[in-house]
Image (tube, grey):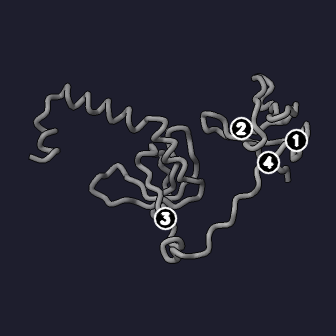
Amino acid sequence: MDILDALRLAPSADLYRLYLTIGRMINDPKRILEVRRHLHIGMTVGYVADDLTQPLRQGRILELRQTQAVVQDIASGRHWSLPYAAVLAEPTTAAQQRPHASPPPPPPPRAQRADFLVGDTVSFTDQHLRERIGTIVRLNQKTASIQCDPNEGHWRVSFALLRKVVDL
């Protein structure tokens, strides 16, 4: 007896418990952060569509939300809000073709206190993975105090987590 036969014979209450358990596992913040760590905007990914009989579809990530990714289907151009569990990051074709290519360049140096001044516009990602933009109102020894919205308080953010915003 395979698992689908066992599920067909299972009582409804057991199926509901399984449904709740799977939902909690899919919405687990640790699992979501692990998937998000491998994704970036503009990346081409595979995703599981509503129709389970179809193979993985291809799409491009347009937006990364707290629990969902907005993906544009490559074939139809439609936008889908998908849970992170339905998105599969795929290696780029260049990485598949050249496995022993030169190593990637080193990351840029981390920002330091000397890189910022009071009044600079900066951005950072908050603990809920939302991009925040604000103005530096005070430089502390290890952090900067950032005012994002006049109606809320200040954020104290490490210099290494700040990015300068350039106004064009």
Q: Which residue is mark 1?
A: 120
Q: Which residue is mark 4?
A: 111
Taking the view exactly as shown, the residue that stands out farthest to the right is 118
Disc 1 residue type (three-letter): Asp
Q: Of callouts 4 and 2, which one flags the residue occurring earlier in the amino acid sequence?
A: 4
Numbered mark located on residue 132 in the image: 2
Q: Of callouts 3 and 1, which one flags the residue occurring earlier in the amino acid sequence?
A: 3
Give whichever of 154, 161 is nearer the camera. 161
Q: Which residue is mark 3?
A: 91
Q: Quadrant of residue 10?
A: top left
Disc 3 residue type (three-letter): Pro
Report, in whole angstroms, how far the alpha carbon at label 3 lies from the one at label 1.
37 Å
- Please identify, in this view, whether the residue under mark 3 or under mark 4 is nearer the observer: 4
Helix, strand or loop at label 4? It is loop
Report, in whole angstroms, how far the alpha carbon at label 2 lies from the one at label 1.
14 Å
Image position of 14 with respect to 58: above or below: above
- Residue that appears at 72% across and 41% down: 124
Report, in whole angstroms, how far the alpha carbon at label 3 lies from the one at label 4.
29 Å
Disc 2 residue type (three-letter): Arg
